[in-house]
């Protein structure tokens, strides 16, 4: 259950973290979409791996939830959403 | 890593491994054969002593197809082949892609859909979607499922690396059992995993990227970039924009001239296929797609207008970062960047990968049984693992046999259906059988049958098609690969029997599902029982 939820919550977090990286880097995000996909996939795998390290089940799940929320909030402060090619 | 953390990492490794192991076995066994997808397409074509008259050329084929099927004018793929060129297009009345070859047209130029083997496509589907049919939904369920499996596989790889990193040197060549069967499975699993780690890492990341693409694109759009992401993806990954027809017609150039014009733009181009958008429309375009040898990301495109004016060249050194990173994703996954040697390496690593997943599942079952005592879950998984593996291996062999045998019978029209049907039937039968039989006896029987099944395929083709089975290069290669699979299965069988002779198998293998007596006795147990009863007398 813990790992299943980790897989479920790890995907949006990894994508939003890559989005934040795209916002931070001084190059158009459209130019490296494929690399973003690959980085997001590897990050997703590593997030699930991190879930296994703590002894208890709930703290890492709560951390993932909070991480998702925080990443989403920070993304709102970036001009990424709605910017076309 | 501290002991407690190491234990949790092993638990994660086992969880993701067991959850994805069987699907990965199917993907890797079918994938090892699918490395030679192009050659298999040639192999599956039946060869009759009396061959039909010389088929029409590419230009006539295009004319006939676009005349008889107006949908093909919008977008079609031409597969150049000196003997039998083919065309693929999306037929709106069927909602599916249709393939027509030059040999499918009669003397009057009318398309007569001939039943054709679809073995190569079936093996490919087994590889990327477990053969789960796609009913035309926006998301391909089988492919997305395999993408998710690839992510779990990646997690298993990273956790496996963390577990074994401290003792990696010690374990590298440690394939020993010392009277302990479980140690043998464990060492086999570790050695294969360590040796082929880079290959597996490539497969998991590229497999996940391809399989999860739709889900990731939807989520990226929803969470990060907004609804315009779709347009951006199209713009960044399509070779040229969609046709905006003004209604002006044009006489299409001869395909030989198209190929010459493309080679003029990119002399080192090796052509694989052509995509034609807007056939006969002045606003249409032709994409000559192929490879530039000598690069990992070898894919190349030369886009031409109908008057053969160059619109765009995408090739190593002349492409955007997106194209430059997309090309290696495909080529590293399919192993088509380094010629026959790399393909053979992928084939071997694919078969070894299958062994990795079987050994992983067996290890988990035995370990769980040792920890918690005999249990139905570990016995069930062991039997299911053996049943699925045997079903897939033998089922694929029977699909090959059906592909060769049926075109020579009155049931030739059912060949594509029979290839899938016989696979599904054998898989289900063997899974049911494995759940009821003693795992040890079931494995012995399957390993006795499987090598002969693969040995029979080239034999049947030789009997039916004579020397064509060995004189034609692609046929020869596929037949040699099938013999190699038979030899590998023979080696596995020999090793399996040797291990049984040298070390007593784990109780799970002899039917000890519960605390009671074994349901099925091994020869050793029977001998021990007989010796005990003799001494009692």
Image (tube, coloured by chain):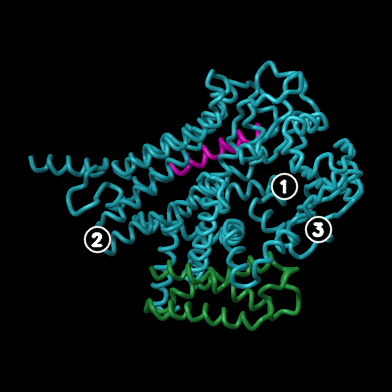
**Residue at the spot x=81%, y=51% of the render?**
B244
Q: Secondary structure beneath disc 1?
A: helix
The residue marked by circle 1 belongs to what chain?
B
Tag shown at residue B316: 3
Which picture quadrant has residue B50? Answer: top right
Task: Estimate the spatial distance between the alpha carbons at disc 1 and disc 3, rounded to whole Å.
Answer: 18 Å
Q: Is B4 contained in the magenta span? A: no
Q: Earlier in the sequence, mark 1 or mark 2?
A: 1
Task: Estimate the spatial distance between the alpha carbons at disc 2 and disc 3, rounded to whole Å.
Answer: 58 Å
The residue pinned by badge 2 equals: B373
The residue pinned by badge 1 equals: B339
* In this view, B169 is above or below B265: below
* In this view, B135 is above or below B84: below
Instruction: Decide which of B120, B235 is in the foreground and name it.
Output: B235
The residue marked by circle 3 belongs to what chain?
B
Q: Secondary structure beneath disc 3?
A: loop
Say whether residue B88 is left or right of residue B460. Answer: right
Percent across and percent down for residue B36 are 64, 42
Boundaries of the magenta span: B475-494
């Amino acid at each position: 259950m813990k790992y299943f939820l980790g897989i479920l919550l790890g995907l949006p977090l990894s994508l939003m973290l890559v989005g934040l990286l795209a916002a931070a880097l001084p190059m158009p995000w459209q130019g490296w979409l494929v690399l973003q996909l690959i980085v997001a996939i590897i990050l997703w795998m590593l997030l699930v791996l991190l879930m296994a390290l703590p002894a208890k089940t709930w703290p890492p799940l709560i951390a993932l939830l909070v991480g998702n929320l925080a990443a989403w909030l920070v993304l709102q402060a970036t001009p990424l959403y709605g910017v076309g090619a | 890593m501290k002991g407690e953390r190491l234990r949790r990492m092993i638990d994660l490794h086992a969880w993701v491994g067991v959850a994805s192991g069987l699907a990965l076995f199917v993907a890797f066994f079918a994938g090892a054969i699918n490395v030679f997808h192009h050659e298999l397409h040639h192999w599956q074509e039946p060869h009759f002593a009396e061959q039909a008259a010389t088929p029409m050329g590419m230009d006539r084929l295009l004319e006939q197809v676009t005349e008889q099927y107006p949908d093909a004018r919008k977008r079609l793929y031409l597969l150049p082949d000196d003997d039998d060129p083919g065309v693929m297009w999306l037929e709106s009345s069927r909602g599916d892609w249709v393939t027509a070859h030059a040999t499918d047209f009669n003397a009057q130029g009318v398309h007569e859909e001939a039943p054709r083997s679809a073995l190569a496509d079936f093996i490919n589907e087994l590889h990327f979607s477990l053969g789960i049919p796609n009913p035309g939904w926006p998301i391909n369920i089988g492919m997305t499922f395999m993408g998710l499996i690839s992510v779990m596989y990646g997690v298993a790889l990273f956790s496996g690396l963390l577990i074994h990193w401290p003792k990696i040197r010690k374990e590298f060549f440690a394939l020993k059992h010392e009277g302990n069967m479980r140690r043998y499975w464990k060492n086999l699993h570790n050695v294969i995993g360590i040796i082929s780690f880079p290959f597996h890492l490539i497969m998991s990341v590229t497999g996940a990227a391809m399989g999860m693409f739709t889900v990731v694109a939807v989520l990226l759009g929803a969470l990060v970039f907004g609804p315009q992401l779709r347009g951006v993806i199209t713009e960044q990954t399509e070779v040229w924009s969609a046709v905006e027809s003004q209604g002006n017609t044009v006489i299409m150039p001869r395909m030989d001239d198209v190929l010459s014009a493309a080679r003029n733009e990119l002399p080192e181009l090796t052509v694989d296929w052509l995509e034609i958008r807007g056939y006969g429309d002045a606003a249409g375009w032709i994409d000559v797609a192929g490879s530039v040898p000598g690069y990992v990301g070898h894919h190349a495109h030369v886009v031409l207008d109908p008057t053969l004016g160059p619109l765009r060249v995408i090739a190593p050194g002349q492409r955007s970062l997106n194209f430059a990173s997309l090309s290696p994703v495909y080529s590293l996954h399919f192993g088509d960047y380094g010629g026959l040697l790399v393909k053979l390496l992928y084939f071997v690593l694919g078969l070894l990968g299958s062994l990795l997943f079987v050994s992983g599942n067996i290890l988990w079952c035995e370990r769980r049984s040792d920890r918690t005592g005999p249990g139905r879950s570990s016995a069930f998984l062991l039997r299911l693992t053996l049943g699925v593996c045997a079903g897939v291996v033998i089922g694929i062999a029977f699909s090959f046999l059906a592909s060769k045998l049926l075109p020579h019978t009155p049931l030739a029209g059912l060949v594509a259906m029979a290839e899938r049907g016989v696979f599904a039937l054998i898989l289900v039968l063997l899974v049911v059988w494995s759940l009821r039989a003693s795992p040890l006896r079931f494995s012995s029987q399957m390993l006795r049958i499987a090598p002969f099944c693969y040995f029979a395929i080239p034999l049947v083709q030789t009997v039916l098609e004579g020397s064509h089975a060995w004189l034609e290069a692609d046929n020869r290669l596929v037949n040699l690969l099938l013999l190699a699979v038979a030899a590998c299965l023979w080696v596995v069988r020999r090793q399996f029997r040797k291990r049984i002779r040298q070390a007593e198998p784990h109780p799970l293998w002899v039917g000890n599902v519960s605390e009671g007596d074994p349901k099925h006795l091994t020869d050793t147990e029977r001998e021990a029982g007989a010796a005990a009863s003799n001494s009692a007398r």
